Image (tube, rainbow, N blue to C red):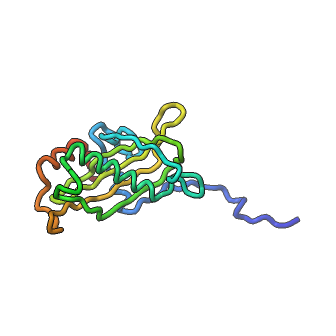
Amino acid sequence: MAATSSLFLRPFVMRQPTLSPLRARFNTTAAAGGASDPRDPAFYKFWTTVQTRWSDNDQYGHVNNSVYYHYFDSIVNTYLIANCSLRPPHTFPRGLVVTSHAAYHRPASFPETLHLGLAVEKIGTSSVAYRVGVFSVAENNVKVCCVSGGYTHVFVAEDGRPVKALPDEMRLGLESVRAITAKL
């Protein structure tokens, strides 16, 4: 009889994951309702839906990772147009994406309708950090997080330089979906 590997005989011990400083930063935010986990729908203040398309699926039958960034861009710009007087391509300042991130929690696939949530994590002089959650609806009508992530815009003037300050109307619109950031 062949000897079995000791790998299969060792008990499996679940270790607490350690977070990089960047990931830890994103896990320390709390929305004004008390929700602190970006995988919790209560974290988000603005919502819209998107219907997945057949072409969103990759060869494995789920929405391709890159498509989620299209969803992020869609909800952010939908909000900016509706609530912050953004009128592309004619208005300034314009937001340029300088960082982005995503954490994948569960797959989604065509023909699901996904629910996109938006919160603003930080508003700077010329920049805004957004948090986006992409949710599907489970059989019990509960929103389940597929992806959480976001990106940072730096707003620039016509000459391409960062603005000295965001316009008041834009800042006011962004403040209405702002999450409260907790420092640990």
Quarter of the figure with the N terminus: bottom right
Task: Please state if 170 lies on the left or on the right of 30 as rendered.
Answer: left
Residue drawn at x 35%, y 50% as measured from the top left? 74
Number of numbered labels in the structure image: 0
Residue drawn at x 55%, y 52% as measured from the top left? 62
* Residue 115 lies in quadrant: top left
Decide which of 114, 37 is in the foreground and name it.
114
Task: Please state if 26 lies on the left or on the right of 105 as rendered.
Answer: left
- Residue 13 lies, in percent from the top left, at 59, 55
Q: Report the residue that reaches farthest toward the top.
A: 140
Task: Please state if 89 lies on the left or on the right of 102 as rendered.
Answer: left
Residue drawn at x 18%, y 63% as measured from the top left? 156
Q: Report the residue that reaches farthest toward the front.
A: 90
- Residue 150 lies, in percent from the top left, at 35, 55
- Residue 64 lies, in percent from the top left, at 50, 56
Q: Report the residue that reaches farthest toward the right.
A: 1
Decide which of 22, 169 is in the foreground and name it.
169
Residue drawn at x 72%, y 60% as measured from the top left? 8
- Residue 84 lies, in percent from the top left, at 19, 47
